[in-house]
Image (spheres, rainbow, N blue to C red):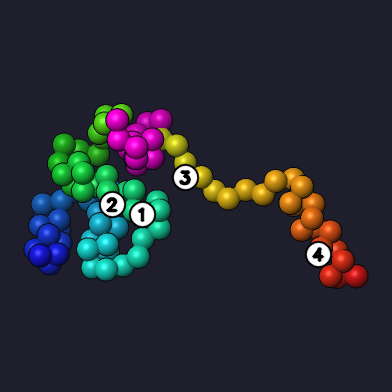
Amino acid sequence: MNEERIESIRKHGKAALGQKELIGHLEGERLTLKQAVNAHCYDCTGFYADGKVDCGMKHCPLHPFMAYNPRREKMATRTMSKVHMEKMRAARQQANA
């Protein structure tokens, strides 16, 4: 089943963000969150059959992160609070003393 789908993607799919990730997923690779979003969008849009454009599906919870959304949000990254950073600095200084 997956082999047929992969072949279909390679034959009919446009080269776009998410193609490589979707194929990797179907081959059993583990994806990062960003890769999974790109793979889902590639699949959902029919391999970008209408072109590499915003899908316009504002009801989709992944739309804010879609690769071709002009108002795309970046994936959240882990940030440390100033208090935590100060504790880390103090611990490093103490370890180096």
Question: Crowding at label 3, few (<14), some or many (≥20) Cα neighbours within 10 Å?
Answer: few
Kindly indicate the quadrant of the structure image that contains residue 70: top left
> Residue 30 location, x and y as percent?
35, 65
**Is residue 31 shown left or right of residue 57?**
right
Measured in 3D between alpha carbons, the distance from the residue under mark 4 to the one under mark 3, in whole angstroms, is 29 Å
> Residue 32 location, x and y as percent?
40, 58
The residue that mark 4 highlights is: 92
The residue that mark 1 highlights is: 35
Mark with earlier residue (3, 2): 2
> In the image, what residue type sits under mark 1?
Gln
Q: Dividing the image into 4 quarters, which one contains the N terminus? A: bottom left
Q: Is residue 47 visible?
A: yes
Mark with earlier residue (1, 3): 1
> Residue 58 location, x and y as percent?
31, 29
Q: Name the element at disc 2.
A: helix
Mark with earlier residue (2, 4): 2
Measured in 3D between alpha carbons, the distance from the residue under mark 2 to the one under mark 4, in whole angstroms, is 40 Å
The residue that mark 3 highlights is: 75
Magenta range: 59-71
Asked if disc 2 and disc 4 are in contact, CB closer than 8 Å, the reply is no
Residue at 27% x, 44% y is 41
Kindly indicate the quadrant of the structure image that contains residue 23: bottom left
**Vertical side of 29 occupied by 34: above or below:** above
> In the image, what residue type sits under mark 3?
Met
Asked if disc 2 and disc 1 are in contact, CB closer than 8 Å, the reply is yes
Mark with earlier residue (4, 3): 3
> In the image, what residue type sits under mark 4?
Arg
Measured in 3D between alpha carbons, the distance from the residue under mark 2 to the one under mark 1, in whole angstroms, is 6 Å
